[in-house]
Image: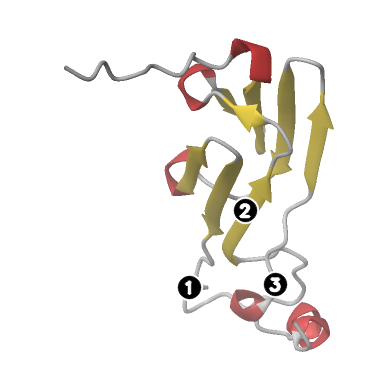
Amino acid sequence: FGDMEYMDKTPNPQYRAFRPAIEIKEKNDKYKIKVELPNVNKEDIDVEMCENAISIKAESKFEECKEDENIHTTEFRYGKFSRVIPFEHSINPDDAKSEFKNGILYIELPKIHEDKKEDIKKLKID
């Protein structure tokens, strides 16, 4: 990550670091995640889940200037973003909910408490 400072100050916007802000809240029954993804299309977001983690990937694509345009100043960030968030409690991916609204990705992940996990089934040996 030593080049991050350079990447943030480079005049070429396509080489700047894309590090969206993330907020994770934990409630008794679920995790709530907010990811700030400005300038990202819903189609460019990928979320994968397993029992104890979530992976969020997104891309903010740089739009090339037309021949008669020059960028004088931009503070927009472009590029690919990837983040894996592990959880202390198991989650139920089947009941997860998400919404992408006004550049914010909202995710709700219900927890599976130990007492609510499926019972272990024994195999009857004949």
- Residue beneath disc 3: 17
- From the top left corner, tell me how far across and down residue 60 is, in percent: 56, 58
Residue that appears at 50% across and 42% down? 47
Q: Give the residue displayed 26% in from the left and 15% down from the top.
A: 124
Could you say whether the residue bearing mark 1 is in a helix, strand or loop? loop
Which residue: 71% across, 20% down? 30
Find numbered disc 3 in the image and state the secondary structure of the residue it sits on. loop
| Mark 2 / mark 3, whichever is N-terminal | 3
Q: Tell whether label 3 touches label 2 (CB within 8 Å).
A: no
Residue at x 49%, y 13% (from the top left corner): 119
Q: Left or right? Give the position of 23 relative to 53.
A: right
- Asked if the residues shown at circle 3 and circle 1 are in contact, with their CB atoms under 8 angstroms apart, the answer is no
Q: Of the residues tagged 2 and 1, which is closer to the observer?
A: 2
Q: Residues within 10 Å of mark 1 (few under 14, many from 20)?
A: few
Q: Which residue is mark 2?
A: 84
**What amino acid does circle 2 point to?**
Val
Q: What distance separates the C-alpha of mark 2 from that of mark 1?
A: 36 Å
The first of marks 2 and 1 along the sequence is 1
How far apart marks 3 and 1 lie (CA) works out to 23 Å
Which residue occupies the foreground of this view, 100 or 98?
98
